Each structure stands twice: as C-alpha cells, then as structure tokens.
Image: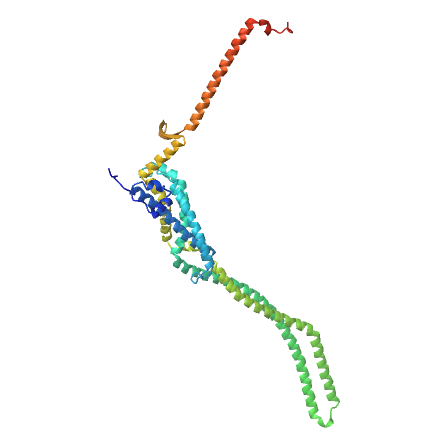
Amino acid sequence: MEQPIYLSEQPSRVSRFLWWCAGADAYFLSKAPMQDRVKYAGIGGIVLCTGLLAAFSGGFAFYTIFGPKNNAIHDTTSWGSILGSIVFGIVWGLIILNLDRFIVSSTGKGDGTDKVTLKEFGQAIPRIIIALILGFAISAPLEIKILESEIDSELSAYQKEYAEKLNGQTDILFKQNVAKLEKDKAEYEKKLKGYEAELKTYDDEIDGLVARQQTEMQDKRAYGFGPVAKKMQMDIDTKRAEKDKFIKLKAAEVGSWRKQLDFADEKINQLTDDLRQAYKDNETRSHGYDGLLKRIQISHEIGGIIPWIILGVFLCIEMGPIFFKMMLNKGPYDYMVENYNKMRQVEAGVISESLLYESVNGIMHMDKYTYLDYETAKAEREEKMHKQKELNKQIIEEWNQATSKEIKENPSKFFNNDQA
C-alpha cells in the first residue's frame, strides 16, 4: 500500500485556540501543511497578545481614573478599586480581542501575493483606521505605567506646587478677613480705652479729694470732723455719684463693645481653624491631579521620544496582522477554503465566474454570479407564459372559425330586428 507523502501532526489545543484568535478554520488548517499552520498561529498569537495588553491597559486606566487620589509617591491601596479594575480589564480585553479577531478575519489576501498594492491598501484603510484608534487607546495607559516612577516624581512636585498655590490664595483671603476683624476690634478697643480713661479721671479726682481730706483732717485732728472736712466729703460723694452715673450711662454701650470684641476674637479663632482645614482641603484638591490625563501629559513632557516609541510599538502590534494578511501568499489552506465555499455555493444554487472586460481604463476584473434557482424559476415562468399565449391564440382562432361558419349558415341571427 502506497504511503502518503506528507503526514500532518494533530494540532494541539493551543494551536487551535490561536487559529480561532486569527479567525481561521481549524478543520482545514488541520489538513494544511505546517507552513499555513504557523502563519495563522502567529497571527492569532499577535491578536491574543493585543487582547492581553488591552486587559492590562484597561485595568490600569480604570484604577487610575476611579482609584483613590493621594500623593503620587505615597499611594494607598483600595481593594474595591482593584477588584473593579480587574473586572473592567477582563471585559475590555475581551472587547479588543473580539474587535481584532473580526478585523483580521475580515481582511482578505488581496491578489494572493506578498506585495501590498495600492488597491489592497485602499481597501484596508477602514480597518487600519480602527486599528490606529485601538492602538492609541491601548498604548496610553501602558505608556504611563512603564514611566510610572518618573511620572510619580514629577506629579508629586506638581501636586506640592499646586497645594502651595492654593494655600497662598487661602492666606490672602484669610488675611483680608482677619484685617477687617482686627480693624473692628481696634475700633472697639479704642472706645473701651477712652471709657477706661474717663473712669480713671474720675478715680484720680476722687483719690485727690480723699487725699486732701485726709491731709486736712490730719492737720486739725484736735478740732474733729469740722465743716471743711464735711465739705470735702460732700465733694467726694458727689464725684463718686457722678462716676456711678457715668458707669450706668455707659453700661449698655460698653457691654456692646465688649461683646463685639469677644465676637471678633471668636471669629479670628474660627478663621484660624478654617485656615488649618483649608490647608488640608487644598492638599486633597492637589491630590486630585492624579488622573489619567495629567499622567499622559507629564509622560509626554518628560519622556521625550520614549512615549512615541512605545506608541509606535503598540501600533505595529495592532496593525501588524492586517498587513501580514495582505502580504500572505495563497497556500493550500486558502485553496481548500475557497474550494469548500464554491462547493457550498453550488449546493445552494449559486455559480460564480471570473470575467475580464476591456474598458477605457484598461482590463477590468469582475465576478459574475448565476443564481440557479432564480434562473430555473424564471425559465419556468417564461415557458408557462409562452404556452399560455399560444393557447389563448388558438382559442381565439377556433372561436373566430366557429363564428364565421355560423354567420354563413344563419346570417339573420346576427341582425338586430329593432334597428330594421
């Protein structure tokens, strides 16, 4: 018994999965030579790696956007955000994997040669545009992850600078408010000092009268409490009465001044507490500059050409399978798939023919499709209409002959007596 020239090994599950990622048919690839197997396994590997990179990229982007905002260097871990990032990363990776699989599987081989013609490139432009957009979306989060340490250092300095800027604005507002309160406080203190000065004037006058009285009584102790001493005592009592009257007269006003001073002191203390709280709020606000957009901006500011190299690498990974498909030569796998598809077309009653037409622009290639069920139904309908037309013609001819014969035999039957 003659042995087959080439025995293909049974493909592994990994190979079948990579073929699935490339959108290829595992049944025909299992019958194809190793060259075709390797081609599509390589394309599937690129698609799979793109999906995995997209999963990591999406997870990191999700955590950067929705994770806790702290100092860039002293970050805190949020397990809730980590779990959400893992779920989102998996979903995002599956979406990109499915999109890339569709893009690659829907990209034909053009003319079947390893040359990428202008016509092939023009037909692939929509897929290339989609791949470009996906490449940008995947590369940006991974780019800032690769440059994370440098970005964190720069971001921490920016957060500190921004917090100082906010603190400066807070200090200006604090000083304005405190200055107004200090002005009011100084006005009330001035009024209280005036009031106390007047009280001191009364006290000085009373003390002077008391001193004079004591001196007078000391010089004339032998005469007792005489008229002069009594007169002095009356003056002292009068002055004390005037002081008491002045105190009663100013009591409400002085009380109001003291309340205003207490209120000003309380407001100043409150503003001081608010200032300390504002510093904390400013620090929290400065930590808000820890988002995806700011990190991408910093990466391009400090990375130089590195971010563009990373972007170029991911664009090559994303668009590579499209160009590889256009550069592939047709192999046994492609002819087996093409043959199978034509067999299915014939079984479905569809026949395709490749025709060449000469036009003013040169030789044109066109595919002509013949739909057998349609052509058969059309022919049957046309034949039925043709036979019906012949039958109608024969019926009319027979009717005409019978009517002519009857007219010859009995012409009076066809006359109208009323008209006669």
Q: Which percent across, then down, holds residue 2?
A: 24, 37
Q: Horizontal placement of 126 versus 6: left or right?
A: right
In the displayed structure, 348 sits above or below 225; it is above
**Farthest residue, direction bottom:** 222
- From the top left corner, tell me how far across and down residue 237 is, in percent: 72, 83
Quadrant in which the C terminus is drawn: top right
The residue lying furthest to the front in this view is 1
Q: Quarter of the image holding residue 294? A: bottom left
- On the question of residue 362 being in view, the answer is no
Front position in the image: 79 or 309: 79
Residue at 51% from the left image edge and 14% from the top image edge: 395
Q: Nearer the viewer, residue 223 or 70?
A: 70
Direction left: furthest residue: 2
Colour theme = rainbow
- Decide: is 405 above or below 329: above
Q: Toward which corner of the image does residue 148 lie, by quadrant? A: bottom left
Task: Please determine whether, in this image, residue 50 is positioned above or below residue 155.
Answer: above
In which quadrant of the rendered view does residue 195 lie?
bottom right
Query: Residue 100 location, x and y as percent?
Result: 40, 45
For the N terminus, the quadrant is top left
Q: Residue at x 38, y 34 (%)?
A: 344
Q: Position of residue 191 (x, y in %)?
A: 64, 72
Query: What number of labels is visible?
Result: 0
User: Could you say which is closer to the camera, residue 26 or residue 60?
Assistant: 26
Of 3 and 370, nearer the camera is 3
Question: Can I make out residue 241 in this image?
Answer: yes
Give the residue at x 49% y 60%: 285
